[in-house]
Image: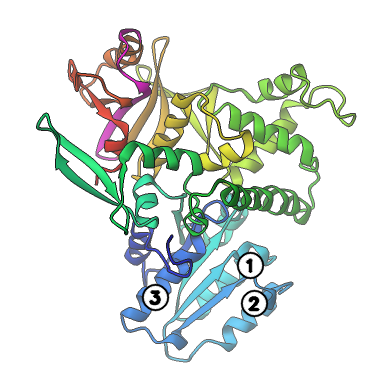
Amino acid sequence: MIDTHELKKRDLYLNKLIAFKDTEPVKVITGIRRCGKSSLLKLMADHLKENGIADEQILEMNFESYDFRNMSSDEFYAYVKQHTIPNKRMYLFFDEVQRIPGWENAVNSFRVDFNCDIYVTGSNAYMLSSEYATYLSGRCVEIKVLPLSFTEFLYFFGFEIKESKSALGGIRKQIFDKNGDIYEMNDVFIAYMRFGGMPGIADVGLDQEKSLVLLEGIYSTVIMRDILERENRRGQKQISDPILLKKIVMFLADNIGSNISVSSIGNTLVNEGLLEDGRHKGTPSAHTVQAYVNALLESYFFYEIKRFDIKGKEYLRTLGKYYIVDIGLRNFLLGFRDRDIGHALENVVFFELLRRGYDVSIGKVDNLEVDFIAVKPDTKLYIQVTESMTSEDVRQRELKPLQKIPDNYEKIVLSMNTGMENSYEGIKSVNLIDWLIME
């Protein structure tokens, strides 16, 4: 068990903050609740202190704290002004700043009035909406934080990968804990797929009961505070039904990686009798369902992925897909059981591609589908994800869309069992776990 007070490194994100240190843009750290944003602020503050910045030049305010409860934007400004040291550069850290009404006015004023470098966090994409952009257009940079990757999961639990030669002359990877106990890579990956990557899991350990309590707390906070309460604060009543919201959450969680239209969600909930509680009459309108889905996207609970016509080279408006930010949250919602492993693996790959800086879409080629097109300014990947490549039927199904793509960018099939071949006419067959732990 790790020391619960130990601040674990998140170098992927910390290095991005360091790269923007002392630049004009406000650094805005976003992501679902409890994914590590507050810890990232502390890591950045520690980095500054280690590099010669005095404690009094660093001001940290956590707006979840009772100390700053019900603070107005004017009081916020006055507090920061009071703690600013003349003729010194200040480093301002504001955690969950969106809880202050009109916070964007104050933050913009700090940028104009003081010699300062500003870092803020928020658990809702609404804070980066058009209203916010009006005040800081072109003057903020977003750092998007996700739950732990598989490699971070290993690090947080103190696991170390060691390689040895197998009997057949290949490389065998095993995992060692701090006591020297040995685990098979697959077993630890199954734990990751079971418990997910919320950093707090490392504090409670791989204990199902404790992890469920942790995940329930995250779910309740996101749904009740970040969605329902925020809607009230905005003076809007569009999202006011916690039962409908939960049913939509359950539906999306159960259908990750499936083609979904907003209109089909309401119809399915009614057809399957999921809204028969005496309160709901008829099918919720597509407009209503879209508002609820948008709220879940804004709270970073789900992510939407669009379709791209590879030959037509355009995005399509039809049938996107949704993935849940953490596979552990899905297991909390739907129960721990082996279900549609293929879609769960897709979910893990989708977020790993986002971590690696890719812009990700679904590929359409003729009437076939490619799981992911992953694009960076200088490269492109086409990726299929499946549980196993040992069956001839599965191989044909996974390879056929990739074979139809008329360009020479890298094409990969990721699976838990690659079979005997590692390449099919230039299409790579790669073990999914090996891909996840690649540097």
Where does the image place residue 255, in percent across and percent down from the top left?
57, 26
Q: Which mark is residue 46?
A: 3
Within 10 Å of the Cα at label 3, are there few (<14), some (14-19), or many (20+) other Cα atoms? Answer: some
Is 18 included in the stretch rendered in magenta?
Answer: no
Give the mark nearer the N terminus: 1 vs 3. 3
The picture quadrant where one finds residue 285 is top right
Residue 365 placement, left or right of 226: left
Instruction: Report the mark closest to the observer, 2 or 3.
Output: 3
In which quadrant will I find the N terminus?
A: bottom left
- Tell which of 125 and 432 is nearer to you: 432
> On the picture, is 284 further left or further right than 367?
right
Kindly give the residue lying farthest to the left in the view shown. 169
Q: Quadrant of residue 48?
A: bottom left
Label 1 or label 3, whichever lies nearer to me, is 3
Which residue matches tag 1?
A: 103
* Above or below for 21 versus 302: below
Q: Residues within 10 Å of mark 1 (few under 14, many from 20)?
A: some
In the displayed structure image, the side of residue 284 where residue 428 appears, left or right? left
Q: Is residue 84 above or below residue 252?
A: below
Q: Are marks 2 and 1 in contact (CB under 8 Å)?
A: yes
Which residue is label 2 attached to?
Answer: 76
Disc 2 to disc 3, how far (Cα)? 24 Å
The answer to whether the residue labelled 1 contacts the one labelled 3, judged by CB atoms less than 8 Å apart, is no
Q: Earlier in the sequence, mark 2 or mark 1?
A: 2
Residue 245 picture location, percent across and down: 73, 38
Residue type highlighted by circle 2: Phe
Question: Which residues are drawn in magenta?
Answer: 377-393
Residue 23's tag is: none
Amino acid at the residue labelled 1: Trp
Dot 3 amino acid type: Asp
